[in-house]
Image (cartoon, rainbow, N blue to C red):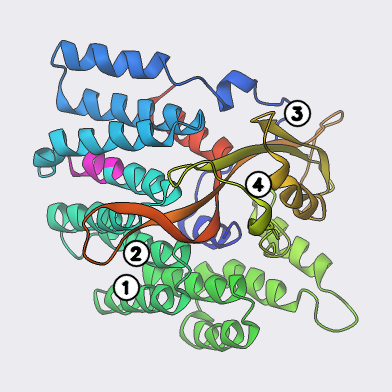
């Protein structure tokens, strides 16, 4: 849910990134998983401090994932968790991040059990270390709702956001209670349930409408709900609300429909196979898409062509640009796989059941790791 993060940015006053006219160098976004894995190996050989090892493991795991080596990425992070979970009390932030990174990889790889457990641990660690009332403990609890949303269980996601919002309100943290309630509205929009989103908007206006800190977020939500209604499709009002909030990143003007990948025509060579594709494109200053292409893998990516067709129809919010600016570049990773299940009477888990499509922004993942490590 790309637009859901917009509300969080507005409420928490996140640092905005300015548009750039330079495309990421391919090696910065898609790398061969060896250099940072070697750095992790050297770290382990010299028995480096736990904090350094955790950073090295997250780098190596992210690098392996970007290279499509899902099993390696999951193994690197699982072993790092096993070695360092005992340090949760002394460096809760690092261990929580490690669990969250492991959860992201496990979700794409199809291990829903590991995804759920790692996500819950990432939240529990901070709650125990910082206390239930700490703002960070409340803020990261949004991961629980995000988790259920990724697992296509919107009712459980909504319940998780609602429960955490109520807890934040009881603790006097109206700012975080509001943020979590806005998440509920964007979840409803992602599910194309405008009546539910409007119902939540009424609640937000009742509880927070008189508070200036929520004015911009409410204006964005109202404008987003108006998109496509009536003769005026609401586009200009939505763009105006975004600009008033000072958002520098382009925002998808509507939730994209899941691309219709014809699963029956996709052939997996084994029950462990995962198909993935990195799709790159420019978001031009006017919000339209340009230079859309499959970056990797070059071969055996015909299954991803419907995704190209969906992305080509997108429109993002326009953004201010300098003369000669050609926009912002994005690389999205799409993964096609089935999840692990254990057959009745057996503890051996195999990939089985429905094949599903999963998405992560490789551009953002790379930028986040570089920001975390100061590179």
| Label 4: which secondary element | loop
Quadrant in which residue 53 is drawn = top left
Q: Which residue is mark 1?
A: 164
Q: Main secondary structure of the magenta part?
A: helix
Query: Who comes first in sequence, dot 3 or dot 1?
Result: 3
Mark 4 neighbour class, 10 Å CA radius: few under 14, some 14 to 19, many 20 or more: some
Q: Given contact means CB atoms under 8 Å apart, are the residues at marks 1 and 4 in contact?
A: no
Q: Which residue is mark 2?
A: 144
Nearer-N-terminus badge (4/3): 3
- Read off the magenta span: 91-98
Asked whether 117 or 198 is in front, the reply is 117
Residue beneath label 3, please?
Answer: 21
Magenta segment includes 340: no
Q: Nearer the viewer, mark 1 or mark 2?
A: 2
Tell me: residue 113, above or below residue 88: below
Tell me: residue 111, above or below residue 273. Answer: below
On the image, the x and y values in percent for residue 155 come to: 44, 80
Q: Earlier in the sequence, mark 1 or mark 4?
A: 1
């Amino acid at each position: 849910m790309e637009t859901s993060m917009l509300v969080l940015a507005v409420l928490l006053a996140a640092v905005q990134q300015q548009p750039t006219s330079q495309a990421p160098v391919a090696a910065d976004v898609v790398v061969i998983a060896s250099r940072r894995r070697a750095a992790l190996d050297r770290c382990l050989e010299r028995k480096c401090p736990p904090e350094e090892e955790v950073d090295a493991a997250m780098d190596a795991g992210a690098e392996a994932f970007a290279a499509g080596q899902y099993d390696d990425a999951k193994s690197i992070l699982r072993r790092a968790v096993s070695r360092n979970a005992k340090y949760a009390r002394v460096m809760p932030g690092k261990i929580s991040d490690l669990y969250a990174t492991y959860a992201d990889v496990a979700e794409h790889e199809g291990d829903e059990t590991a995804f759920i457990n790692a996500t819950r641990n990432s939240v529990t660690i901070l709650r125990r270390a910082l206390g239930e009332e700490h703002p960070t403990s409340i803020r990261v609890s949004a991961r629980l709702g995000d988790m259920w949303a990724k697992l296509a269980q919107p009712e459980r996601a909504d319940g998780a956001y609602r429960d955490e919002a109520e807890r934040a309100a009881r603790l006097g943290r109206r700012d975080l209670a509001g943020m979590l309630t806005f998440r509920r509205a964007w979840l409803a929009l992602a599910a194309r349930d405008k009546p539910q989103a409007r119902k939540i908007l009424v609640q937000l206006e009742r509880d927070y409408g008189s508070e200036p800190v929520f004015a911009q977020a409410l204006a964005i939500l109202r404008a987003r709900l108006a998109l496509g209604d009536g003769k005026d499709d609401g586009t200009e009002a939505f763009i105006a609300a975004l600009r008033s909030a000072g958002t520098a990143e382009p925002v998808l003007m509507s939730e994209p429909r899941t691309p219709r990948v014809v699963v029956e025509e996709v052939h997996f060579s084994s029950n462990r196979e995962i198909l993935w594709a990195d799709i790159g494109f420019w978001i031009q200053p006017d919000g339209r898409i340009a230079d859309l292409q499959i970056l990797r893998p070059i071969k055996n990516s015909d299954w991803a062509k419907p995704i190209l067709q969906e992305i080509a129809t997108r429109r993002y919010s326009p953004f201010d640009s300098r003369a000669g600016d050609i926009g912002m570049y994005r690389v999205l990773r799409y993964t096609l796989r089935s999840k692990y299940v254990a057959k009745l009477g057996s503890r051996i888990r195999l990939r089985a059941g429905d094949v599903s499509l999963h998405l992560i922004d490789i551009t953002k993942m790379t930028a986040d790791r570089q920001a975390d490590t100061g590179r």
